[in-house]
Amino acid sequence: MSETLPTVLLVDDEEHSLASMRMALEDDFDCLTATNADDAARLMQEHFVQVIFCDQRMPGKSGVAFLSEVREQWPDTVRIIITGYTETNDIIAAINDAGIYQFLTKPWHPDQLVMSAKNAADLFRLNRENAQMTLEMRYLSRSVESKVEEQRRALREGLGFENVLRAPNSPVNGVIEQARQFASFDVPVMIHGEAGTDKASVARAMHYSSLRSDRPFYAINCVGVDEDLLEEELFGVRRRGMQGRNTQKLGLLRKADQGTLYMTGFTELTARLQLSMARFAITGEFRPIGGGEMERSDVRLIVGCEKDMAKEVAADRFRADLYYAINTTALTMPPLRSRLADLPVLAQNYLFDAAAKHGKPVHGLSDDALRFLERYDWPGNLRELENEMVRMLIFSQDSILGPELISRHILQANPETGRESDAKLDSVLVSEGTLKDRVEQIEMRILRETLTRLKWNKSRAANELGLSRVGLRAKIDRYGIAAPDKKRGAQHQEEE
C-alpha cells in the first residue's frame, strides 16, 4: 500500500496562480485549492490539512486575517503566506499575530515552493511527534527531549541558506559554511562586500537558521537617509505634546526585540548615530527620541559594509568602540566577477523570475549568450545582472535568448586580455601604446559587438559601419574575430 501524501491547501483568488502552485506541488502532495477564505475554511473542516499556502491580498478577508483564524481552530497546521515585494515589512509585522511560519515573495520559484512545502510538512510531523512523545513519555529521561529538540534544530538550520543561489562548486560555499556556524551563536555579525553582492540574503538566512528564527527579522538601508529620519526609524519616538497629546512610534530596535536587525550601509552612519548605536551595541540600551529614560532591547545586529571598516576607523571616520562591538564575527561576500561559476545559475534564475513577473515565458539563455556574460566585469554585481536579464527579456522574440540581446557595452568586453582590462573604454584611452594600437583595440571591440548584435549578418554589419563587405571581411581576418559558435557557420554567412 502506497504512503499517503501530505495534504496542502492552496488559497489564492487568481486561478492561474493556483494552477501554477498545484503543478509545482502535486507530485509530492495532495493539493486542495480555494479562491477565497470562506471556501478555504470549509475545506479545513472537511480535510486533514498539514500545510497552508495563502495569498495575502484577496477580495474580502486578507491572508493574515484568515490565517489568524486558522491558528485559533487548527493550531498544528503550518501556515505560510505569499506576498508581493512592496508589502514585505507589513507581513513581517503580522507574523506573530497569525503565527505564520514563513512568508514567500512573488514571483516565487517552483523549487523554492516545493522546498518550503517539504520543510513545513516535516515541521508539522515533528511537532505532532513531539506532542505525542510529551504526553506518553513525560516521566522518561531528559535525553528523549534533547533528541526531539536536536531534530527540530536540524530542521531550522536547513532553512534559509538554500535561498542563496549558487553553483555546486561556488566560491560562496565557504562563506555559507561560515555563516551557518555563526548563525547558531547569538553574536553580532559584520558582512563585508561590494554593493549588489546580496549580503541581505545571507543575513536573512542566518536569522532563519538561528534560535531567533521564530521572532521578527527587520532590515534597513542607512545609505542616503536623512539623519533625523533614520534616528526615528531606529530608536522610535516618545514625545509629550501640548494639551496632553502624546506622540509614540516604535523604532526598529524595539520592534526587533528577541529577533534580528540587519543594517546595510553601516559605514554611512553619522557621528551622532554612531554614538547612539555604540551605546546600544555595548549595553543593549537606547533612548527613544523625546524619551526621558533608557530602554532595553535584545536584538541581534547584523550589519552590511561596503567600505573597509578598519581603514574608516584608522581615518577617524568611524567610532572604534562601535566597530569592535560589532566585529565579533565577520564574513566577506565576493563580487560577481570572482564567482563567475555562479553566473549561469544566477542569470537563468533572474531571467525566469522576470519572465514570471511580466508574464512572458522563456526557456533560458543560449550558450553563446552565457559566454559573453561571463566575459564582463559586472561592476554592479548581482543587481546589474538582474537588470540585464530584465532588459534582455523585454527585447526577446524567441524562447531561447541569444547574445544579440545583450547590452552593447557588455558585448564589447574583450575576451582575450582579461576581465580587469576590458570593462571600460577609459582604460584604453589612458593606457600606454601608440595611437594606432589603441585605436585598433577600440575598433576590434566595436566590430565584435556589431557582428554579435546583428547575428553575424555581415551585409548588415558592413552597411551599419560604413564598410564594404570586402573591407569588413579583411578586418575580421586581421583581428582574428570568430563567431561564438563555429558549428553554426552556415547561419553566419552574409546575405547575398
Image (spheres, rainbow, N blue to C red):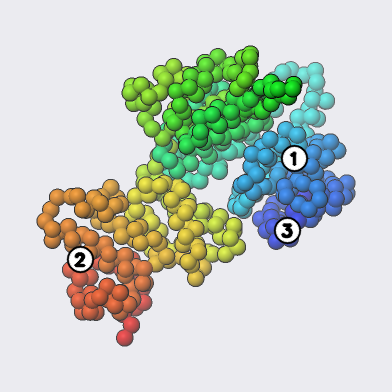
> Which x, y percent locates residue 431?
18, 50
| In the rendered image, the vertical position of residue 292 relative to residue 386, given as above or below | above
- Location of mark 1 (residue): 78
- Location of mark 3 (residue): 14
| In the rendered image, the vertical position of residue 169 relative to residue 348, given as above or below | above
Tell me the kind of residue under disc 1: Val
Q: Are the residues at dot 3 and dot 1 in contact (C-beta closer than 8 Å)?
A: no
SS assignment at label 1: strand
Q: Is there any visible trace of residue 491 in the rendered image?
A: yes
338 or 154: which is nearer to us? 338
First along the sequence among labels 2 and 3: 3
In screen coordinates, is 243 left or right of 312? right
In front: label 3 or label 1? 3
First along the sequence among labels 3 and 1: 3
Tell me the kind of residue under disc 2: Tyr
SS assignment at label 3: loop
Q: Which mark is residue 119?
A: none
Tell me the kind of residue under disc 3: Glu
> Which x, y percent locates residue 185?
55, 23
- Tell me which residue sits at (31%, 65%) in the image: 449
